[in-house]
Structure formats: structure tokens, C-alpha cells
Image: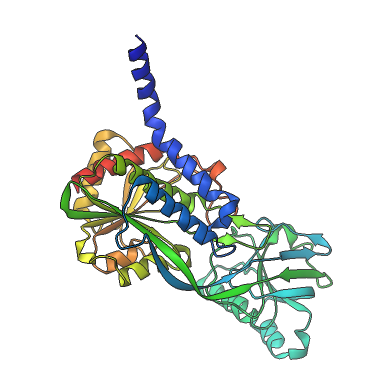
Amino acid sequence: MYKLSAILLLFCLFPHAQQEFGLEITKELCSEKYDGRGYVNDGHLKAAEFVRSKFVEYGLKPVEKEYFQPFPISVNTLPGVASVSLNNKKLEIGKDFIFDANSGSAKGEFSPVFIQSDKDFFNFEFGNESREGKVIVLVDPESKDIDTNQMYRDWKYKGAQLAPVICLTNSKFTWTVGRTSFNHPIIELRDSVFSKELKKDSRISINVETKFLNNLTTNNVVGKIEGKCKKKTIVISAHYDHLGRMGNDAYFPGANDNASGTAMMLYLAKYYSEHQPPCNLVFMSFSAEEVGILGSRFYVEHPMFPLNDIDFLINLDILGTGEEGITVVNGAVHKKEFKKLSKINVKKGYLNKVKVRGKAANSDHYFFSEAGVPSIFIYTMGGVSYYHDIYDKAETLPLNEFDDLAKLLMDFLKKL
């Protein structure tokens, strides 16, 4: 009776083992000690070392002498103070406003100059004496046609070469990693909240420290497991980097994007380190995806083994939900493999839907695919929609289909 009870208990617990593992890894990578896995306080290096330590723990072997593949990038960072006050009221970073990732430094009190037309901008641009102590305020145009939006973007980026810029907007705050540095900062400010408070006689205090890092070294992390069939090699990839910090007071945890994909990659690495896979598996954890998929691009240009030896690549990015199933980028390209994946899902009833999509340059599969490596990119659909903001936290990420997706991937690997 005791043995039967123990077996039943194990059976009940096993289906949740993957999710518990995923939650643990996601929580770790989203903790503040990694500083958003970006390029302030060496967050990217700390995250790379965590992935490497897991590869070592699971017994993965390096493809070359080392797990790390270093490469250079250039990024703009906001490492120190980053504050804005309106009429002596300090605003909350990430909630009330954000700095554009390409912002330059500024410190002082400014008065607004409202730009609503080409004439306004022309007068400001050539009135050199009027720039001192001024901040350009761009009113979000009501029209959303292509020409108007392009004009608005031109004002924003040209304006930041002349003076600090405030963009009044009701769009979702979505941050990124800066790849250049303007002369002055650009601030996105919540229009619905602050437009009534922002008048011609308003006083705006801006204090932001930015630092452009040229030729910063970051690392891809690569490890392998030898399979039963030595002639076939499958790559499983996921980027570990995220956006980092915006000043001292705000960091971007990046739970869904892409602690979740890294967690799935590490789960599969751990599982296959304990159960020999059907073929050789190479696990690639990329840096600088958020800088323009630079890590995977560097790898493709400097492969550790011939790209022709890769039979298939599965890239994992944004796997934190799944209520509405998954989307398979390049599924329309690799129809045979997509059909296998979809057929397994229908038979086992793992996910609500497996949606096909064509080519897209939106994650680390792209440069492999362009180089002729058969590649797909899988992401989940539905649920929480936090993305590139301060709210993409481990605490709010359900990972509710992590178990089923792990099983689907393991079944799929058997069919490749």
C-alpha cells in the first residue's frame, strides 16, 4: 500500500516538474541582481555566467575549448541618475515617462517650446539663441497616416540634436537598447495624465546620465550533448539578454522576453543530460538579441562547427503564456517539419493551437535561416501582454503551458 501511494504521488507531481523548473529559472534571471540582463552593472555578463554554470552542472561539453564565444557590441546606456520633474513634482520612471534608449545626457531646468507644425520646428531649429534652457514638446499628431508619423519621428530625432525633447503620447511605453547617442535626451511622457499640467510657463527639471559603450565585450554561451545518432545535430537556442536598467530606479526584468525561453532551453539541457537524446544536441544561448539579433548573427559569421552540420534549429523566445497556443515562425517555409509538430500536438492534445507563420527577422533563428540552416522560431500566444516594459516580471508570468510545450518539443525531437 505504501509503495502504491508513493507511485501515485510521484505520478501526480511529475506533470508539474517542468513548470516548477521554469518558474525557478525565470525568477532567478529576473531578480534584480542581474540588473535586467543588460549592459549596466555587467548584467549581461552575470546572466551569461549563470547559463554557463548550468551547462557545467548538467554536464554539457563546450563545442570548442570554452563555453563562451565573446564578441563586441556598441550600446548606449543609462547607468546613473535618470529623473524628470514637472512643476516640482517628481515623475515615476517607467510609469509616467521613459527616456528613449538613444538619449544623451542633460541636467537642468527647462521651459517648453511646443512644436505642432513644420513652421514651428523651422523657427526653433534656426533660432539658435532660443535653444538655451528650452525643451521641445512634440504633440502626438491625431492623424496616424504614414506621412504624419514619419514627420513626427523626424521632429523627434532631429530635435534631440538641438535640445531635450518631450514626446506626449498615450501609446504603451516600450523600451529597447540604444545603438547610438543623441546630443540630448528624448522623453516619452504620458499625454493623458500630464498634457493639462504642461503649459508654456511650466518648469521641467531633467537630470539624466547616459554613457555610450563602444566595443563592449559580451558572450554567446554554447554547450553540447552527444546523442545516440552521431550523424544528426539539432540546435536549441534562446537569447538570455534583455534591456537592463534605465537609471538607478528602474530595471526591466524580462520574464517573458526571454527568461522564459532560456528556462525552456535549460530544462531541455538538463533533461537530455540525464536521458541521452536521439541525436546530437547543441544548446546556444545568445547575447545581444535585443541590440538587433547581433549574437546569433556573430555566431553565423563565426561558427564553432560547420553550419552545414546543423540539421535543424529550434529557437525559443517568449514562452511565458500559451492560452492561445504557439506560433511557429518559418513554419510555412519548413512545411514537412511543421506538419510533424502540428500532428503530434493534435494527437497528444498538448496545446490549444499550433499556428503557422512565414519568414520574419524577429529573433535568433533569422540569420541561421538566411545562411541555409533549416530553422524555426516558436513563441506562445495569449495571456499577459507585458513586453519591453518594467511590468514583465516573474511574479506575473504564469508559464501555464510550459509543461505541455516541453513535452511537445521532446516528442518533436524524436521525429526530426
416 vs 55, left or right, is left
Given the current orientation, which residue lies at the most extreme front position? Answer: 65
Residue at point 71%, 65% (across, down) = 81
The answer to whether residue 113 of the structure is visible from this angle is yes
296 vs 232, left or right, is right
* Quadrant into which the N terminus falls: top left
The answer to whether residue 389 of the structure is visible from this angle is no
Instruction: From the viewer's side, name the closer residue of 183 and 51.
Output: 51
Indicate the quadrant where residue 21 lies.
top left
Instruction: From the viewer's side, name the closer residue of 356 and 245.
Output: 245
185 vs 52, left or right, is right
376 vs 119, left or right, is left
Colour scheme shown = rainbow
- In the rendering, at what x and y percent does residue 394 appear? 54, 45
Given the current orientation, which residue lies at the most extreme top position? Answer: 1
- In the rendering, at what x and y percent does residue 371 appear? 26, 69
Q: In this picture, is 200 found above or below 378? A: below
Q: In this picture, is 413 found above or below 239? A: above
Residue at point 31%, 68% (across, down) = 300
- In the rendering, at what x and y percent does residue 218 appear? 46, 67
Counting the numbered discs, the total is 0
Q: In this picture, is 223 found above or below 215? A: above
- In the rendering, at what x and y percent does residue 277 appear? 23, 44
